[in-house]
Amino acid sequence: MLIPINSASFLPWNDGDPAPQWGDIFGNNHPLALEIGCGVGDFVVKMAELHPDWNFIAIDFYNKGCLKTCKRIDNGGLSNVRVLRVEARSFIESCILPGSLQAVIINCPDPWPKIRHRKRRLVNTAFVAWLSRFMLPGADFYFATDFDDYGLDVAEFMTRQEGFENQFSPDAYRHTLEGYPVSKYMRRFLDLGQSIYYVHYRKSFHYL
């Protein structure tokens, strides 16, 4: 049974519902940033504090994570974040206008470590190409993972991804990213001496 989420930061939405009108929901037309897989919300809360002139849409499929995210947002008194419990692809197709996102953020998605399961990974070249439709020219794509193989794989295929420019050039990835919050999940691995792989690309202004 799902725990009810009674928070002004939570936006109930189901497949088939009308698309949210983000300008009305946030009360402004600030740039939209999407975090896919917000976990317990510590990252998006820090980002929303750092970027009060951006509106953040934080999505996750797990109810308990959405609940904890909303509590963090409400405790922080933030008005520039909304949380939805949704599946990423159907939500984006239905609720995000093409060419409307200023940033897409994906932190530590399920790495599906077994070789036979790696085709299930969320982030691959087809998924990034699909996401590009919803991003503004000049929009940022951030990917971070604690799993070495996943980080190296994304870093490698992004060098060939049409319509994106590497913001770490000539490096394919980095282990630190200034101004990018470290979540509690990331900190757990850093404290064990493991590395976080950061990949940062920007959608080309010449690619619509």
Image (tube, rainbow, N blue to C red):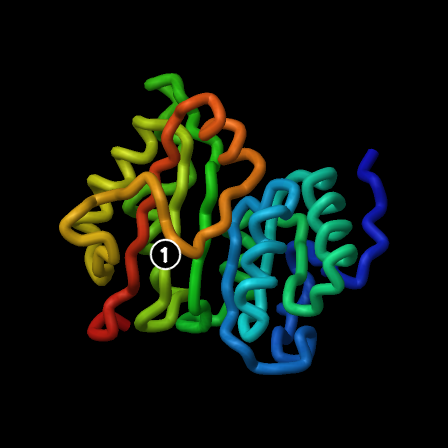
Q: Is residue 63 above or below residue 96?
A: above
Q: Is residue 60 above or below residue 195?
A: below
Of residue 41 and residue 178, the one placed in the foreground of this image is: 178
**Residue 152, how many percent across, how many down?**
26, 34
Q: Residues within 10 Å of mark 1 (few under 14, many from 20)?
A: many
Question: Label 1, on which residue?
Answer: 141
Left or right of 93, for residue 207: left
Left or right of 46, for residue 126: left
**Residue 74, how many percent across, how many down?**
77, 58
Residue drawn 26% across and 43% down? 173
Of residue 84 and residue 142, the one placed in the foreground of this image is: 142
Quadrant housing the C terminus: bottom left
Quadrant housing the N terminus: top right
Left or right of 2, for residue 111: left
Residue drawn 50% across and 35% down? 186
**Residue 150, how many percent across, how many down?**
33, 32
Q: Amino acid at mark 1?
A: Phe
Q: Is residue 10 visible?
A: no
